[in-house]
Image: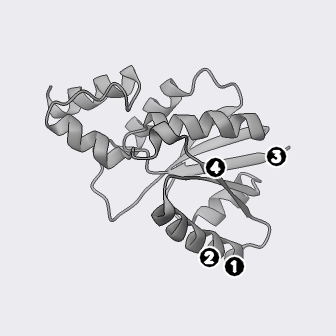
Amino acid sequence: MRIAVYPGSFDPVTKGHLDIIERASKLFDQVIVTVMFNQSKSPMFSPEERVELLQKTTAHLENVSVDKHMGLLIDYLKSKDARILVKGLRAISDFEAEFQMASVNQKLCRDIETVFIMTRTEYMYLSSSIVKEVASFKGDIRAFVSEEVRDAIFKKIGG
C-alpha cells in the first residue's frame, strides 16, 4: 500500500491545499493530511480546530485521513509506515525551501521520497497568510477557502 503524508500548518486550509489533497488522493492508496506545529508562527486556529476544518473539507475523499503531529516529520512518517512525503509548490521560492527540506529528510531517512505537486495556476498566488489578511479587512474570501472555513475565520475574527 502506498501511504503518503501531506504535512502543513493549514492555518487555515485553502482551496489550494484542497487541490493538492484531491490530486494526491488519486495518486496514492492513502493520504494522511497532517497538521504540523510551527513554533515560529502565530496560528489563528488551534491544531484541533485545523484538524476539524480539514476533516470537513476532505470528507468526500475516502482515502484521505487527517492527523496532527508535533516533532520530527521523519519520525511521524515512520510511525505511519509511510514512505512518501507530498509537498505542494506554488513558485520558485517554494521550490528552494522545499528542495532543501527534501534533501534534509533524505539524509535523515533514505527510504523517504518527496513528491512535489505543482499547484494549479488559479491557486499560485494563494496562501493561508493572504487569506487571513484579506479576512482581517472583512474582504471576500469565498474564492480562497470553502464555506466552512470562511465561516470559521469570520467567527474567529468577529465578522
CA gap, disc 3 and disc 2: 22 Å
Pointer 3 residue: 2
Figure check: 49 above or below 43: above
SS at mark 4 in the image: strand
Q: Amino acid at mark 1?
A: Lys
Pointer 2 residue: 104
- Nearer mark to the viewer, of 2 and 4: 4
Q: In the depicted view, which residue is nearer to us: 139 or 136?
A: 139
Q: Amino acid at mark 3?
A: Arg
Q: Quarter of the image containing the N terminus?
A: top right
Provide residue 134's location: percent of width, then percent of height: 22, 38
Pointer 1 residue: 107
Q: Earlier in the sequence, mark 3 or mark 2?
A: 3
Q: Are marks 2 and 1 in contact (CB under 8 Å)?
A: yes
Label 4 neighbour load within 10 Å: few <14, some 14-19, many 20+: some
Q: Earlier in the sequence, mark 3 or mark 1?
A: 3
Q: Quarter of the image containing the C terminus?
A: top left
